[in-house]
Image (cartoon, rainbow, N blue to C red):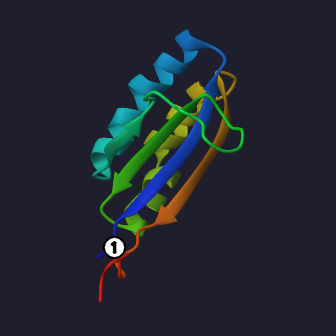
């Protein structure tokens, strides 16, 4: 089974409200086997423009990633995030094919 990822780029506009979102989203993430790979680390922008914060969350499958987003638990967390940040979120299927250098 191929893993899947949420890739988000956000700018937080209200820290206190965003912390409430973070506290609430853990319930959905635990339920669907999510794992943070990137969570707001230092950014060195080498091309383009974008939001101030990045996050990459790994899920065991594309189905789990989509189900987590649609879940009542995560939808409740989104309500807390609204107005506290701007940005984008994508759900992306993983890749299990050949890698550079493979023959």
Report x, y in % for residue 73. Answer: 44, 40
The quadrant holding residue 83 is top right
x then y, percent, for residue 23: 39, 23
For the point 32% across and 53% down, the residue is 32
Q: How many labels does the image show?
A: 1
14 to the left or right of 2:
right
**Taking 19 as reference, is 98 above or below it?**
below
Quadrant of the drawing holding the N terminus? bottom left
Residue under the point 29% across and 48% down:
31
Q: Which of 57 and 48 is in front in this view?
A: 48
**In front of the other: 98 or 80:** 98
Name the spot of residue 59 as percent of width and height, x first: 34, 57
Give the residue at mark 1. Answer: 2
Q: Which of 59 and 40 is in front in this view?
A: 40
**Residue extending furthest toward the bottom:** 103
Residue drawn at x 29%, y 89% is 103
Report x, y in % for residue 49.
72, 38
Seen at 66% across and 28% down, the residue is 82
């Amino acid at each position: 089974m191929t893993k899947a990822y949420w890739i988000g780029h956000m700018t937080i506009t209200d820290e206190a409200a965003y912390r409430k979102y973070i506290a609430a989203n853990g319930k959905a993430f635990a339920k669907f086997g999510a794992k943070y790979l990137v969570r707001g680390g230092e950014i060195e922008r080498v091309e383009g423009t974008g939001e101030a914060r990045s996050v990459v969350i790994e899920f065991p499958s594309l189905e789990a990633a989509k189900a987590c987003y649609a879940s009542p638990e995560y939808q409740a967390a989104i309500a807390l995030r609204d107005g506290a940040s701007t940005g984008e979120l994508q759900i992306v299927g993983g890749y299990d094919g050949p890698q550079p250098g493979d023959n």
